[in-house]
């Protein structure tokens, strides 16, 4: 009989459960039985994978000394096979019992779709209670992937996932780890699945017979919009390389949205969990919040003595160390010009990545400039797209072509680069990605690159006894690595990705060429290096000369003015808090809680924390440290409130303002809307005396110069005993 | 009382001496003795009522904390010292005699208001220091219910970690014993720390309970037990804060209504006395 290639093969005759059958030579007993209608149960074997015979559930009696695994045992001429004898059934039952002893029943798959192959088999065998003891040491779960939940407890080590990954998809991510009792499946060199090179194709998940690898519950989220057929999605270049299996399993995670001209797609400051990909039409991306900061003045004071809070732009009031950026970073492939923060996005553009991947608030408002069609997707889909190497290359090429130029020039020190040099960089820079918690470079490493933050947040810290000192949080437009490159060639700090981070990496060679060719860039960078080194030196001095447990309080020493309450006089009447609220349009900037120094309480005002958590996640990068370490909130704050939420001490408040904006329903008409701006306690610097002090009837509240105060108090700052 | 009170003390003492001297002269030279309806009596009465009104305005001043009409501290000093002077002036006005039911009621009210005010001043002078030393983990009074919910949640998490062997493998019996102590003693206390029969409200009983648990359990869970014990201590401090806070402010429940009654009845008395 000729086979598929036309090679002539001979047949073998054998008997299976009394049935005489003839199969081509080389056929396994399992296939011979199945092709002749004799079912043999199995767990580790799948038709599209090489049989390995590890579960032994498919054992049959071929008349030998021991039972044989039918999936790997080749059929032989005149072989007599028994698939269902009492001996076979007993052995098979014991094997299933042993597997069930280790299996968390019901497993995730059994709970989700009631089709765990092992539990189904156990039910067929009538196994209710396992006779064997469970394993003592837990193997654990891995929730690091956005797409697939890994439950090592439910893994029966059948290797179907490994063969699916290696043989079928040829991704070579999955393998085995450990031996004997500690054996399990592993991603790359035993990394968490989310940090591995897994492209989330889903093959392992569909191969798995149990609940060890299951689809995560993201698909329970129902997105409003039109459902899209998988085949149709795969026609689009953006989704072309995404596994159909995955898209089928997550068909609710991508929807088509139609927007009419003028319709709002998303608003700045809103929380969301999706990204948008434009397929037709154009969208306008802009900031609706006024480009201004909160100014409190007492011009309306006099007898009533209230502070008036107003919004002032750069032109009306220039604050010391206010950012001089010309562009505002947003969660889209473009930055917005400061003077007119509007840009246009078109087909092929993706926006909302940061919101989708890291759940940050929307950084800008997007409105359909024409009738638009967009695909809205959840982060499991975006994650898989970003892991796809071909697509990544396409996106990177698009970034190099369209945005790198603007991105580089948005950084003031690079504003003088010539077009020729930017063109040179365009092809030489590397676009690199890091997952949450990944260390980008460590203190002491060789400095081989300069980095520009394209997406996400990077923590720059120095290790010290007792904990890291955070030097900065860098968002889009931030950069690092220049100190090492211009200094001794060694990294002076450790940089870590706080979330999904994308960086532009300029190698040392190009960096040195850049600073040689453009003296202005070199001078700016050298000035910046000196400034940063001086700041770091001062911080280090403080950190080493002060006990670490009191170091946190040093922010107070650096302050210009502190609000201190004498707790032996304070009757806790809260007149100060009411006065503060009364003075600031009903928004209190004071909380009568804080650090205690003997009988004194330093009430709430910015502490310039060692780890300024308020700065993490600002979608437009509008909150930062001044050189004096105080916090400054830039004019382009969109009022999302994330900094206020992040501040553990409640030192940042959201101040509402009524502003006029264009009415989308009535062209040419204005409508009033409430916008928020972040503010922190300004100690009523505009007034001769802060309202809280003025309103204290018990002479308990005082505004003091910190150094003088602590000298006068004559004691080292010490916090009250708190729980660990 | 610090140096900032000195000008007020001097002014009040001077006014008291002058008023008393004037009264003595007036009483000695008036046949039939001093009377409230006389010119001098009326002067004392009006001055006294004016001071009452001023003292009463402190409450109104607190409602407009940002108005630049003098620091609240100045108003408070005035309230204290001029309120005290007011008692003297009214006594001089009455000639130390309470002739009718209304005036008798007024005098009783005046003594009550002044007495409760002195008591309040004393409480507000001494109790904040007591609160500071006895409640190092003091929080904002209005936040106490939220803090308690957080403490309860934290305790539940710790207890779950201990009883589910997340920290260390424990014998079944030990685990059950811990669960029993947590569910029967710790949790009910955290649920209702003000309950009169709460065993853990007593620091000594609490120490005994956690000491017994430490003897029962192995060292790896001591950290979690310490945290649980500290949570109970924080609860006790919050209960203490509530009690002290009530002491700090409860006297106002007497002082303020009586002051209002005094002002109203004083006005009625003035109208009636002048008209009839």
Image (spheres, grey):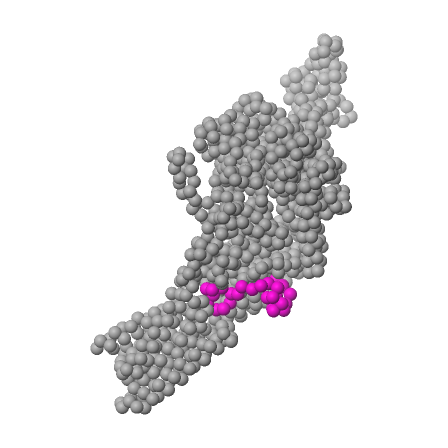
Tell me if residue B6 can be seen.
yes
Tell whether position A359 is magenta.
no
Asked if A479 appears above or below A723 in the picture, the reply is above
Quadrant for the N terminus of chain A, please: top right
Q: Nearer the viewer, residue A417 or A588?
A: A417
User: Furthest-left residue in view?
Assistant: B276
Q: Residue A323, image x and y in percent?
A: 58, 46
Residue occupying image coordinates x 70% and y 57%: A541
Q: Nearer the viewer, residue A607 or A306?
A: A306
Residue occupying image coordinates x 63% and y 18%: A37
* Quarter of image, res A8: top right
Left or right? Give the position of A513 relative to A225: right
Asked if A141 appears above or below A654 in the picture, the reply is above
Residue occupying image coordinates x 48% and y 77%: B6
Q: Residue A624, image x and y in percent?
A: 59, 48
Tell me if residue A107 can be seen.
no
Q: Which residues are magenta?
A: A693-720
Tell whether position A714 is magenta.
yes
Q: Residue A520, image x and y in percent?
A: 68, 41
Asked if A536 appears above or below A97 in the picture, the reply is below
User: Furthest-front residue in view?
Assistant: A519
Left or right? Give the position of A70 relative to A241: right
Quadrant for the C terminus of chain A, please: bottom right
User: Furthest-right residue in view?
Assistant: A65
* Quarter of image, res B109: bottom left
Q: Residue A105, image x and y in percent?
A: 61, 37
* Quarter of image, res B208: bottom right
Number of dots carrying numbers = 0
Residue occupying image coordinates x 59% and y 26%: A238
Q: Nearer the viewer, residue B220 or A21?
A: B220
């Amino acid at each position: 009989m000729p086979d598929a290639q036309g090679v002539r093969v001979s047949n073998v005759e054998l008997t299976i459960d009394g049935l005489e059958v003839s199969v081509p030579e080389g056929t396994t007993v399992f296939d011979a039985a199945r092709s002749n209608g004799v079912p043999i149960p199995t767990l580790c074997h799948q038709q599209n994978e090489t049989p390995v015979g590890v579960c032994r559930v498919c054992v049959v009696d071929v008349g030998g000394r021991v039972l044989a695994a039918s999936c790997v045992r080749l059929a032989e001429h005149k072989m007599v096979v028994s698939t269902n004898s009492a001996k076979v059934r007993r052995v098979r039952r014991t094997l299933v019992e042993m597997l069930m002893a280790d299996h968390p029943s019901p497993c995730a798959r059994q709970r989700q779709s009631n089709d765990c192959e092992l539990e189904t088999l156990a039910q067929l065998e009538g196994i209710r209670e396992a006779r064997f003891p469970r394993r003592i040491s837990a193997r654990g779960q891995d929730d690091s992937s956005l797409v697939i939940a890994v439950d090592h407890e439910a893994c029966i080590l059948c290797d179907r996932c490994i063969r699916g990954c290696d043989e079928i998809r040829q991704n070579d991510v999955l393998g085995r780890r450990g031996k004997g009792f500690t054996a399990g499946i592993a991603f790359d060199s035993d990394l968490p699945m989310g940090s591995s090179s897994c492209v989330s194709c889903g093959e392992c998940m569909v191969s798995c017979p149990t609940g060890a690898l299951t689809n995560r519950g993201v698909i329970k989220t129902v997105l409003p919009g039109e459902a899209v057929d998988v085949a149709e999605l795969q026609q689009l270049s953006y989704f072309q390389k995404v596994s159909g299996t995955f898209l089928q399993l997550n068909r609710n995670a991508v929807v088509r949205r139609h927007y009419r001209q003028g319709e709002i797609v998303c608003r700045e400051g809103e929380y969301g969990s999706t990204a948008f990909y434009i397929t037709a039409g154009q969208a306008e991306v802009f900031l609706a919040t006024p480009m201004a900061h909160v100014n409190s003045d007492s011009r309306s004071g006099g007898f009533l003595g209230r502070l008036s809070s107003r919004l002032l732009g750069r032109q009306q009031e220039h604050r010391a160390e206010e950012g001089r950026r010309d562009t505002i970073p947003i969660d889209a492939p473009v930055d917005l010009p400061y003077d007119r923060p509007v840009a246009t996005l078109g087909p092929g553009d993706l926006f909302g990545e940061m919101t989708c991947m890291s759940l940050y608030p929307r950084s800008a408002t997007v409105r359909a400039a024409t009738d638009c069609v967009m695909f809205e997707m959840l982060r499991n889909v975006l994650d898989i797209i970003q892991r796809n190497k071909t697509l990544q290359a396409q996106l990177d090429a698009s970034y190099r072509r369209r945005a790198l130029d603007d991105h580089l020039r948005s950084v003031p020190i690079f504003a003088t680069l010539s077009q020729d040099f930017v063109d040179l960089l365009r092809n030489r820079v590397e676009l690199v990605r890091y997952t949450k918690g990944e260390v980008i470079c460590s203190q002491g490493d060789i400095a081989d690159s300069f980095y520009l933050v394209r997406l996400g947040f990077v923590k720059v810290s120095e290790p010290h006894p007792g904990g890291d000192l955070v030097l900065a949080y860098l968002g889009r437009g931030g950069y690092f690595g220049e100190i090492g490159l211009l200094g001794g060639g060694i990294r002076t700090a450790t940089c870590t990705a706080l979330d999904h981070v994308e960086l532009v990496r300029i190698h040392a060679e190009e960096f040195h060429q850049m600073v040689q060719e453009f003296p202005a860039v070199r001078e700016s960078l050298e000035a910046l290096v000196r400034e940063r080194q001086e700041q770091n030196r001062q911080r280090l001095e403080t950190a080493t000369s002060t006990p670490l447990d009191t170091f946190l309080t040093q922010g107070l020493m650096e302050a210009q003015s502190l609000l201190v309450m004498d707790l032996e006089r304070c009757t806790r009447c809260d007149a100060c808090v009411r006065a503060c609220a009364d003075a600031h349009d009903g928004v209190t900037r004071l909380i009568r809680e804080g650090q205690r120094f003997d009988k004194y309480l330093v009430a709430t005002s910015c502490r310039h924390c060692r780890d300024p958590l308020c700065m993490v996640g600002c979608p437009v990068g509008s909150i930062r440290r001044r050189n004096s370490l105080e916090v400054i909130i830039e004019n382009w704050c969109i009022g999302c409130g994330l900094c206020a939420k992040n501040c553990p001490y409640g030192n940042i408040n959201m101040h509402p303002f009524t502003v006029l904006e264009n009415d989308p329903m009535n062209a040419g008409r204005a409508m009033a809307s409430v916008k928020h701006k972040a503010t922190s306690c300004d100690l009523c610097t505009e007034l001769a005396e802060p309202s809280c002090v003025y309103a204290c009837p018990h002479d308990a509240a005082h505004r003091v110069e910190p150094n003088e105060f602590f000298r006068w108090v004559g004691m080292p700052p010490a916090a009250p005993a708190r729980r660990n | 009382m610090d140096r900032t009170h000195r000008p007020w003390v001097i002014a009040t003492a001077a006014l008291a001496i002058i008023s008393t001297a004037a009264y003595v002269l007036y009483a000695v030279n008036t046949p039939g003795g001093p009377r409230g309806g006389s010119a001098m009596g009326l002067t004392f009465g009006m001055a006294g009522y004016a001071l009452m009104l001023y003292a009463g305005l402190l409450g109104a001043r607190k409602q407009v904390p940002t108005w630049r009409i003098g620091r609240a501290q100045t108003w408070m000093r005035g309230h204290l010292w001029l309120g005290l002077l007011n008692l003297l002036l009214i006594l001089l006005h009455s000639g130390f005699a309470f002739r009718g039911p209304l005036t008798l009621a007024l005098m009783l009210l005046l003594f009550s208001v002044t007495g409760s005010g002195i008591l309040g001043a004393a409480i507000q002078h001494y109790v904040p220091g007591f609160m500071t030393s006895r409640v190092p983990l003091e929080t904002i009074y209005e936040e106490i219910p939220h803090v308690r919910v957080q403490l309860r949640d934290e305790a539940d998490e710790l207890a779950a970690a201990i009883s589910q062997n997340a920290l260390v493998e424990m014998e079944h019996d030990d685990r059950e014993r811990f669960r029993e102590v947590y569910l029967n003693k710790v949790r009910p206390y955290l649920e209702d720390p003000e309950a009169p029969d709460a065993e853990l409200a007593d620091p000594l009983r609490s120490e005994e309970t956690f000491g017994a648990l430490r003897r029962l359990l192995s060292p790896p869970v001591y950290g979690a037990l310490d945290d649980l014990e500290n949570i109970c201590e924080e609860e006790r401090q919050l209960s203490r804060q509530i009690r002290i806070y009530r002491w700090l402010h409860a006297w106002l429940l007497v002082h303020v209504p009586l002051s209002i009654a005094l002002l109203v009845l004083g006005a009625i008395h003035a109208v009636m006395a002048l008209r009839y």
